[in-house]
Image (tube, rainbow, N blue to C red):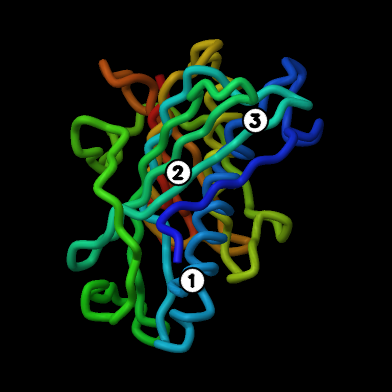
Amino acid sequence: MNDTMNVSSVVPAYETGPNDRMHYHWLMWRLQEAATMHANREGFGAEQLDAKNCFWILTSMCIEISELPKRNDIFSLTTWSRGAKKLRALREFEGCDESGNIIVRASSEWMVLDSESGKPLNIESLGIDLLPKTKSLFSEKIKRIRPGKPEDEIRTFRVPYSSLDASGHVNNTEYLRWGMDALRMQAAVPEDISSIRIAFLSEVFEGNTIRLMNCEKTPQGFELLGHNESNNKNSFALQVQ
């Protein structure tokens, strides 16, 4: 058993933009994949939880970026569990360039839901060993962001089939892609983003109508809210600086 997972690979062209740097949603995809690989390898992944009639969901993530991975360079990502307390489990990530410099740090929060009721379960009572480490990359606890007060609508669209993942709902990385593109359209993001915080509030499915709205700028940066018009629920909140 190993309490950490390391994944290293070359950054392909399709993960990068015109500046030869990785898109933010691809960075988040890599974080999610590393977490999935670690959980599956060590016996607390999707298959093991399915046998217990439950499943993982990602509820929030904070990503600190000093430099985005560069096209054709090797990007190394290490992840580990911080364990669980009742309903919430924590996981952290550290990303390095090919010279070994730390360029990405991230912290994430997860929950386990009952497959039938959809209600959160006490993770500590599931009898799974998350191989927790005490190492934390952040000196203070990362608090989940709360949706801000929306000001102006940026765009409204219907969710396409291509945004869905194997679970049948929109993949978390899509929310970040939608949000970053919307803020860029409004010229509301700095050229070099150093911090991304995102909270996932409710599921979104194919054909749902999503309204993206920017919120009042705060000292913490620019905020955006994704609202699902089909069920009148907020689907995600995003904050960047």
Residue 144 found in image quarter = top left
Where is residue 188? Give x, y as percent. 49, 16
Task: From the image, tell me which residue sits under label 1.
Answer: 45
- Vertical side of 35 occupied by 211: above or below: above
Q: Are marks 2 and 3 in contact (CB under 8 Å)?
A: no
Q: CA distance from mark 2 to mark 3?
A: 20 Å
Q: In the rendered structure, find residue 212 and report the number of the disc placed on it.
A: none
Q: In the rendered structure, find residue 226 and report the number of the disc placed on it.
A: 2
Q: Amino acid at mark 2?
A: Gly
Question: Which mark is first along the chain, 1 or 3?
Answer: 3
Where is residue 20? Give x, y as percent. 74, 19
Count of marks placed on residues? 3
Residue nearer the viewer, 181 or 92: 92
Q: Residue furthest right?
A: 13
Q: Amino acid at mark 1?
A: Gly
Question: Which mark is first along the chain, 1 or 2?
Answer: 1
Q: In the rendered structure, find residue 23 and report the number of the disc placed on it.
A: 3
Q: Look at 34% across and 33% down and name the residue there.
A: 150
Question: Which mark is first along the chain, 3 or 2?
Answer: 3
Where is residue 129? Give x, y as percent. 33, 72
- Vertical side of 82 occupied by 221: above or below: above
